Image (spheres, helix red, strand yellow):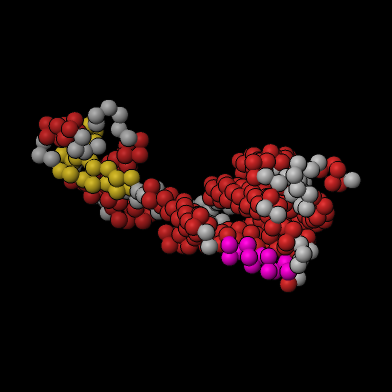
Amino acid sequence: MNGLWLVARREITTRGRTKGFVVGLVLSAVLVGALAVLPRLFSGPDSFTVGVVDSPALQSALAGVAKDAEVTAEPFADEAAARKAVLDGDVDAAVVDDRRTLADGEVDRELGALLESAHQAAQTQKQLAEAGLDPAKVSAAMRVTPLEQVSVGADTRYEDVRTGIAFLLVMVLFFLLLQPSMYVAMGVVEEKGSRIVEILLTSIRPWQLLGGKILGLGILALANLVVIIVAGLGAAVATGFSADLPPGMTGIVLGTLFWFLLGYAFFATMAAALSSLVSRQEEVSSVISPLTLLIMATYFVSYFAAVEPGSGVARILSLIPPFSTMVMPVRTAGGGVPFWEIGLAAALMAVATAAMLALGARVYERAVLRTGARVKLSEVVR
């Protein structure tokens, strides 16, 4: 185990100190933090400016009905001045004598609803006063406790937020599974092509060299994922967006880490085994094309699962390795996944990962010292 950890530590110090890794780590944190902050910046209340001519009651009523919007009332001396302000774009609309609304074209739907509500409130107060009734007492008598809404089906309050989290997980897991696996493949070919692997294997065993490389790069990838999660949750707390997060976020975060570790072990081992068949960097992309296609297929299936997490295709593929490494956390973020499905998917993926580790280590051990022409996988297996 000492040899394995020595190789892992070498990968961590060598790759972790590069400018590309540090810059990528910072950019990941900034981008995820921005994704949590931008919705708050662009979802602020709508603001309107309304001209008022001889409508003091409406002006005061606007403040009472405008809860999710900012409405500023600007008084004008006469209709001509209000009309000019509307045409010049100084106000969004103008109300004249509590009878007419002036607008350049159609009134905005939200603004029109606000004006109508304010008009109704102002005229009701006026007519009650003219009838000799106390508006406060009438309002109290008409105040009725609203009906309590109880959902007997699935809770859809967090549906949009869950969908957003699912899409974010698809992108994050895709890049954090593909990029480190590529680094593993390039590292294997670099050591084989320069024949450094021959020197290293005089001191340590092949499985230690392979395991240390996968472990070291995996720790860096895991650190990147943790930074992304911390940055996203931190930005959500700072902006108040955390109040809109669905319940069970701890389970979603821990599940994402778990599935990432299984997926990384599977794909990185596959990348190392395939890349050990060649000796030149130019051949890496072609030899690991099956791995690339498999990750891309998993990505597209996960994208579909983010849109339709309850579909039959998503449920079936979330149980099948290695699709489950991305599809299951996406389904979990969408909510409503039975525990037995999560347990079955985890067990199947653990078995598949163990099988890939055994097969990949055997292929790597038999092919990594064979330099020159590309080695056939079928020959190595035999």
Which quadrant is home to the N terminus?
A: bottom right
Q: Is residue 305 magenta?
A: no
Q: Residue 7 in the image: state x and y as whole percent.
A: 68, 65
- Asked whether residue 5 is drawn in magenta, I would say yes
Measured as percent of width and height from the top left, residue 342 is found at 74, 54
Choose between 247 and 136: the one closer to the eye: 247
The residue sitting at 69% across, 38% down in the picture is 286
Q: Residue furthest right?
A: 382
Q: Position of residue 318 (x, y in %)?
A: 73, 47
Outermost residue on the top side: it is 105
* Image quarter (top left, top right, bottom left or bottom right) of the C terminus: top right
| Residue that sits furthest to the bottom in the current view | 2
User: Residue at coordinates 70% horizontally, 54% vertically from top-left?
Assistant: 195
Count the labels in the image: 0
**Considering depth in this image, is 199 or 93 the residue closer to the camera?**
199
Residue occupying image coordinates x 73% and y 69%: 3
Is residue 231 shown to the viewer in this render?
yes
The correct choice, above or below, for 299 with respect to 265 in the image is above
Residue 291 visible: no
Main SS type for the magenta part? Answer: helix
In the foreground, 339 or 367: 367
Which portion, as a residue range, is magenta?
A: 3-14
